[in-house]
Image (cartoon, helix red, strand yellow):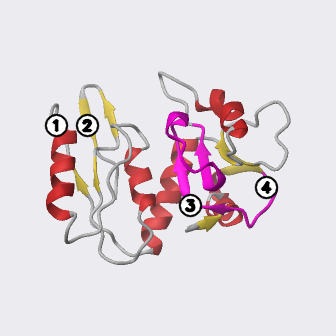
Amino acid sequence: MALYSIGEIATILNPVTSSTEISDPSFSISHLLTDSRSLTYPESTLFFAITTESGDGHRYIDQLYRSGVRAFVVSAMPGGSYPGASFIVVDDPLKALQMLSTTNRDRHGSIPVIAITGSRGKTTVKELLFQLLGHTHSIARSPVASTHASVYLCRFGKSTPTPTWPSSKPAFHAAGRWILWPQ
């Protein structure tokens, strides 16, 4: 199920976009990716090349392209040739992910969010809540461990306007504390 076309995403991200190179504006996107190791559906994935203290997502563009990914949000155009690929260039791919996720959530009404904080047991509590609520509610869980992007990937994961309970870990970790994003 396609949530957006790459052309729609380029329009949504226009306020933070410095340039675009779109090969096919109707190319369907239904999956967002920030970790190249988690690629499952390359034919419908949009990769956000996020730079963190421990890594730079731009290093994985070649590998992802060879694996079939054709849509990327980057902070700089990569060198080389990528026939049939689309690139949206922004100052900060993480902020672009946040913007797209927030737009998706706004499009489908206010979806309640449960944020789990603390120094230990977050994954256990997240999974327990999923098991307890999953039989009666549609739940979007954070697909990855606590990262800058996990909450936003979770928000994008549910596109239905029916009541949904995203259960996710906090947005990011700084100075020994979990900091929640503004809603």
Q: Is residue 81 left or right of residue 104?
A: right
Residue visible at 71% across and 64% down in the picture: 7
- According to the picture, the residue beneath numbered tag 2 turns out to be 178
Under mark 1, the amino acid is Gly
Give the mark nearest the N terminus, 1 or 2. Answer: 1
Distance of mark 4 from mark 3, alpha carbons? Answer: 17 Å
Q: Is residue 38 magenta?
A: yes
Q: Identify the image quadrant of the C terminus.
A: bottom left
Question: Are the two marked residues, 1 and 2, in contact with CB atoms closer than 8 angstroms?
Answer: yes
Q: Depth-wise, is mark 1 or mark 3 nearer the camera?
A: 3
Query: Disc 3 or 2, which lies upstream in sequence?
Result: 3
Q: Which residue is mark 3?
A: 30
Disc 4 or disc 2, which is closer to the eye? 4
Contact, mark 4 vs mark 2 (Cβ under 8 Å): no
| Residue carrying label 4 | 22
Mark 3 → mark 2, Cα distance in angstroms = 29 Å
Q: Do tag 1 and tag 4 residues touch (Cβ < 8 Å)?
A: no
Q: Position of residue 32 (x, y in %)?
A: 53, 51
Q: Is residue 111 magenta?
A: no
Query: Residue at left 23%, top 32%?
Result: 177
3D distance between C-alphas at marks 1 and 4: 42 Å
- Magenta segment, which residues? 21-49
- Which label is found at residue 118? 1
Kind of residue at badge 4: Ile
Mark 3 is surrounded, within 10 Å at the Cα level, by few (under 14), some (14 to 19) or many (20 or more) other residues, namely some
Q: Amino acid at mark 2?
A: Trp
Mark 4 or mark 3: which is in front? 3
Element type at marker 4? Answer: loop
Say which element carries label 2.
Answer: strand
- Work out whether 99 lies above or below 146: below
